[in-house]
Image (cartoon, rainbow, N blue to C red):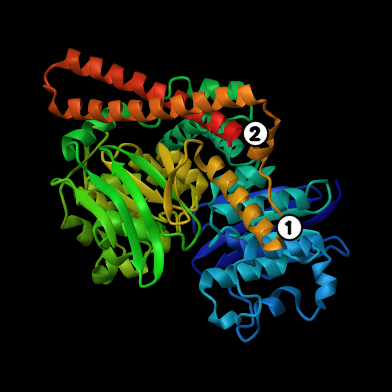
Amino acid sequence: MAHLLGAEKVHFEYPNQVVFDQISLGLEDGDRIGIVGRNGDGKTTLLRLLAGTTEPMGGRVTRRGGVTVGVLDQRDSLDHDGTIAEAIVGNRPEHEWASDSRVRDVISGLVGDLDWHARIGDLSGGQRRRTQLAALLVGDWDVLMLDEPTNHLDVEGISWLAEHLNRRFAGNKGAFATVTHDRWFLDAVCSGTWEVHDGIVEPFEGGYAAYVLQRVERDRIASATEEKRRNLMRKELAWLRRGPPARTAKPKFRIDAANQLIEDEPPVRDRIALAQVAAARLGKDVVDLLDVGVSFGDTEVLRDVTWRIAPGERTGILGRNGAGKSTLLALISGTLRATEGRVKRGVTVKVATLTQELDELAEHEAEPVRTVVGRLKANYTSGGKEMTPGQLLERLGFRAGELSTPIRDLSGGQRRRLQLLLILLDEPNVLILDEPTNDLDTDMLAAMEDVLDSWGGCLIVVSHDRYLIERVTDQQYAVIGGELRHLPGGVEEYLRRSRERDAATAAEASGKPQVSAAQQKRAALGGAELRALEKEFSAVDRKLAKTTDARAKLMTKFETHDQSDFDGLLALQQELADTDAQIAGLEERWLELSEQVG
C-alpha cells in the first residue's frame, strides 16, 4: 500500500503539558483509522498535526506529492452570510453538480430536510455542522480528517455516514482518520484504532470491539497496573461478545481469545435482582400514558400514545430530531401536561432528568467539587454495596486531585459526570437521560454505563448514540409520525422502517408507487401460505401481549412476597427468567413474521 502522509518524531507541547514526544506514524492507502483516548490527551491535536493545520514543535509531518487532504474541524468555518447551496456547491451550475451521484447522495443524506437557499447565520448549530460536513464530503479528497463527525447527527444520519464512508473507501485507495466517541460508528467504519495516551499514540488492529479485546490483553499482561480500568474493559468486552447479534456476527478479533478472557465474567446486569429492587422502591405503578396526545396550537406533536412503564423497565427512545422525543420525556417527568388523554403516576414515583443544559450545577460554579458533594448523602448503595460519594466519583472517572477543582473549571465531560452523581445521590427511582453522551470520551462512557448497570430503577434514555442505547437498555421504542412504536428488532428495525418511510415519501413526491421489500416478499407467497403466516402472526402477537402482562403480574408478586421466604423468591426468579426468555423468542418470531406478511 502506498504511503499518503505521516509524522516523523513529532513533538508538541503546551506551556503546562507535553502532548506528544517523538511520535512516528502514518496513513497509507486503505487505512480507516479511529482515534480514541481520554479528553485532553491530544486526539484533536494529532488530527490537526497530520492535516497540516497545526505545526509541530519538533520533528516533521510528511505528505506524498499531490495528496489532497480534506478536514472537518470542530470549529465553525462557514461564511454566515452565505447560503447552504453556496457552502456546499459554491458557484457550480446546477446541471453540473446535480449530475454527480456523490453530490446528490451527500445533499440527500445530510441536508435534504433544510432550505437549500437558507442563510448559514440563521441555522442552528447542528444544522451548520451538517452543512459543514456536507461541504467537505462533496469534494474529491485522497485523505479525510474528521473531528467528531457524528456530532449533531441522529441515528439515521450516523448510519448514512457510515455507509457513505464504506462506499467511498471500498477499495485500497485513499484513507481517513476520525476522532469520535461513537463506538458503534468506530466498529462500523474503522479497520484500525489509535489510542492517544500519556504522550504516545498506540496502534491497534480493527474497530472498537477489537481494540477493547487487545487492550484487555495488554492490561492482563501488565497485571500490576490500572486494575480498575482493566476490570471495566473486561466488562465491556463481555457485553460486546454477548451483546446484539448484529454486533457479534462479524467480530474483527479472535473469538477464542475473547471467550477465554470473559468465561468467568458475569452478565453486565443482574436483571432479576434489579427488578426486585425496582419493585420494592416503586410498587406496581410507575407512569402510565393512556391515549395521550400533545398539540402546540395547530401543531400535533404526539397522538394516541399508550405506554405503561413497568418497575425496572430500561427503555431507549429513538426518533428523528423534532419527532417529539423531548415532549414524551416532559410528559413522563410531569413538566408538561397532555392535551388529550391521561397521565397516571404512582405515589412513590420520584423522577430525575439528566438534561443537556447542566442546570443542576449553575448555582455552584464557584464551589469546589468536594464542597458540593459533601452537602449530599454520606453513602450510596450500588449493586448491593454501600459507597461514599467520593468512591462513586472515582468510579465515574474523577481523580483525587480533581475534588478541589471549582465547578467552573471542570471540563464538559467532568461536569456531565458530576451532574449524574448529584442526581444519583438524590435517589430517584425513575431516571431520564437526555443525550447523556455529550462531552464524554469512550472510557468515561464505559464508566457511566458501569454505574448504570447496578442502578435499580426505571431508566429511560434518549440518545443518537446507538452503542449506548443497545448497551444500557433492554428494549427500544421510536417516536414516528407522532406515534410511539415498539421495536422488537431494536435499532436495526428502526433504521429499516426509516428507510422504507423515506422511500415511500420520495416515491409519493415523484408520483411513482413504491413497492417495499416486505411487499415484494408478500407478493411472492402463495395464497394459502400467506394466510397461514398471517394467522401465525396474529397468534404470536396475542401471545406476546399475554406473556408481557404475565411478566407485569410477576413483578407485582415480587413486591408483595415475603422477603424472608428465599425458596419462594428463588422460584419467582426462575419463573421471571423463563418468562423473559419466552418473550425474547416471541419477539424474534414476531419480527420475522412481520417482514414476511408486510
Q: Is residue 20 left or right of residue 359?
A: right
Whole-number angstrom distance, CA of label 2 to CA of label 1: 56 Å
CB under 8 Å between discs 2 and 1 = no
Residue 409 in percent (x, y) is at 36, 68
Determine the secondary structure under disc 2. helix
Looking at the rendered structure, the kind of residue marked 2 is Arg
Looking at the rendered structure, the kind of residue marked 1 is Ala
Figure quadrant of residue 285: top left
The answer to whether residue 398 shows anywhere in this view is: no
| Badge 2 or badge 1: first in the primary sequence | 1
* Observer-nearest of 87 and 534: 534
* Observer-nearest of 566 and 310: 310
Q: Mark 2 = which residue?
A: 522
Figure quadrant of residue 74: bottom right
Figure quadrant of residue 294: bottom left
The answer to whether residue 53 shows anywhere in this view is: yes
Q: Residue furthest front?
A: 527
